[in-house]
Amino acid sequence: MPRERKNLDRISKVRDTRTYFLIATEGTETEKIYFDALYQQVLLNPALNKLVKIEVLERETSASSPDYILGVLDQYAQDYLIYEGDELWLVIDRDKNTEDSHIANLVNVVQRCEQKGYFVALSNPCFELWLLLHLTEVTTSTYSVDKLNALLDNKKRTKNSRTPLEQELIIFLKSYQKNNYHTTQLLNHVDLAIDRAKKMDTTANSGDRWQDYLGTRVYLLVDKVLQADII
């Protein structure tokens, strides 16, 4: 006999009509800080009266492979009641790994998400690009080609140095740590970030599963959340 699935935090006797965006993320802190702030600072604004809930799914370990993150979504889909209109999202990074096995694994994970009805928001090279887009365009109008390539590669110069994307965030935010950064300055410009990411996504309608150059499809998730129904 199949076990009874749990009901998230919806009221058991009255259907909670909020749309749930359930998000499994590659990082354990950076993405959660952002999405928790988006929910608390923007979506809970009384002037908006949004019928939406964002929940970054908890993980038992710090494992971060795309396979493992997909397994987190699968486990929640198995354990909890997922209502029509709810969405499950995988937020992962392309990273700089160019090994054939890594690329094949990413393709496999994205294909499985498509089959299961999950959504994927992949950043190339990583989630910090999405944060930076709140603060500036990342194009040849703002950076040299060499600098853009360095951001895409996103390699530390030394073991203890910061990545190029982290260095850019520090310039704008004055300080930045993956587990501690100010979100208000970012969220004040979330609409700009969406527009900038859209302009960078030149392959959005081509069927490509991610962008080969600098880009992030986190905007697809955030835009959906912000466009969700109001009361």
Image (tube, grey):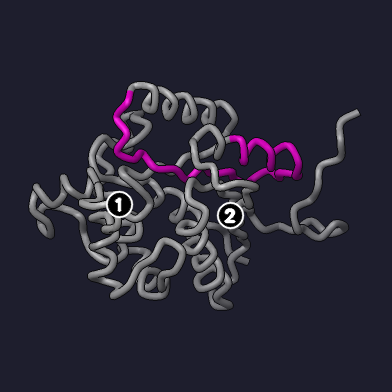
Give the crowd class for mark 1: few <14, some 14-19, many >=20 residues within 10 Å. many
Question: What secondary structure is marked by label 1?
Answer: helix
Most distant residue in the front direction? 159
Which residue is identified by label 2?
A: 56
Q: What residue appears at the point 53 percent right and 32 percent down from the top-left corner?
A: 67
Please state which amino acid type lies under the numbered disc 1: Ala
Considering only vertical position in the picture, is 174 above or below 222?
A: below
Give the crowd class for mark 2: few <14, some 14-19, many >=20 residues within 10 Å. some
Give whichever of discs 2 and 1 has the lower sequence position.
Answer: 2
Q: Which label number is shown at residue 229? A: none
Point out residue 175 in the picture as x, y percentages from the top left corner: 32, 73
Most distant residue in the right direction? 1
Identify which residue, 134 or 175, lies in the foreground.
175
Identify which residue, 84 or 58, lies in the foreground.
58
- Residue 75: name its quadrant: top right
Residue 143 falls within the magenta-colored stretch? no
Point out residue 154 in the picture as x, y percentages from the top left corner: 25, 48
Q: What residue appears at the point 43 percent right and 55 percent down from the top-left corner?
A: 223
Extent of the magenta region: 71-99
Identify which residue, 18 or 197, lies in the foreground.
197
Q: What residue appears at the point 23 percent right and 63 percent down from the top-left corner?
A: 168
Residue 96 falls within the magenta-colored stretch? yes
Considering only vertical position in the picture, is 43 above or below 3?
A: below
Q: Is residue 65 left or right of residue 160?
A: right
Question: What secondary structure is marked by label 2?
Answer: strand
Q: Is residue 145 left or right of residue 226?
A: left
Please state which amino acid type lies under the numbered disc 2: Val
Point out residue 181 in the picture as x, y percentages from the top left corner: 41, 70
Which residue is identified by label 1?
A: 197
